[in-house]
Amino acid sequence: MNLLHNRICASDKWAEKVRTGLFPAVLDDLDLGGEVLEIGPGLGVTTRLLAERVPKLTALEVDEKYVALLRRRLDTEIVHGDAADMPFPDASFTGVVCFTMLHHVPSPALQDRVFAEACRVLRPGGVFAGSDGQPSLRFRLIHLRDTLVPVDPSTLPARLTAAGFEDVRVWRMPGRVNFTARRPG
């Protein structure tokens, strides 16, 4: 992430938006179970807030500098690894979540690998949920010289189904696409 993006994602304003808007919209009606994986926590705002909601949280982060930062700041298991090739056994988690990170995955094909891996590491009946930003001038400016591959809400249901999920639900909020899906079983 670039400097501006880092500043925004570390801000109290962003944390409040996650706590009062994003999380209630996506998570309030879900039971993630007792062992949850967060993919791509970045600076850890969502991780800190998730840790207040779930009994056991593991976070998977690809960027080594964020891994080191998160390990210093949080009392949560932080694993260094790639979400498109997760270092976890099949059926390890009761819930998997990702917030505002999918657009940092450099291609739709790799995003599809992330979806497939999320399905693989979920226990049967487990929930995959998340949200990602949608293109706007502000969103694009925040991502100058940064990876930006927005998720197309119109193709997301088919992509999640192709990854192995059922009960797929995709909905939009201003500037966001949200989703939930369930691993069969």
Image (cartoon, rainbow, N blue to C red):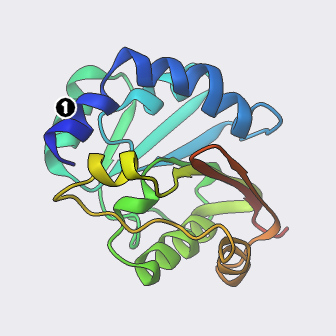
> Is residue 54 visible to the viewer in this orientation of the structure?
no
| Residue 120, image x, y percentages | 60, 71
| Residue 184, image x, y percentages | 82, 70
Mark 1 lies on a secondary structure that is helix
Q: Which amino acid does label 1 sit on?
A: Leu
With 86 as the anchor, is 42 left or right in this view? Answer: left
With 107 as the anchor, is 158 left or right in this view? Answer: right
Q: Choose between 85 and 171: the one closer to the eye.
A: 171
With 15 as the anchor, is 32 left or right in this view? Answer: right
Can you say whether 22 is above or below 64 in the image?
Answer: above
Q: Choose between 1 and 176: the one closer to the eye.
A: 176
Q: Choose between 185 and 159: the one closer to the eye.
A: 159
- What residue is at 40 percent from the left and 64 percent from the top? 83
The quarter holding residue 124 reads bottom right
Can you say whether 66 is above or below 63 in the image?
Answer: above
- Residue furthest to the front in view is 137
| Residue 149, image x, y percentages | 39, 68
- What residue is at 66 percent from the left and 77 percent from the top? 155
- What residue is at 59 percent from the left and 48 percent from the top? 176
> Is residue 145 visible to the viewer in this orientation of the structure?
yes
| Residue under numbered circle 1 | 69
- What residue is at 21 percent from the left and 48 percent from the top? 1
Dot 1, how many residues are within 10 Å of its Cα: few (below 14), some (14-19), or many (20+)? some
| Residue 8, image x, y percentages | 30, 30
In which quadrant is the C terminus drawn? bottom right
The quarter holding residue 67 reads top left
Query: How many numbered dots are placed on residues in this image?
Result: 1
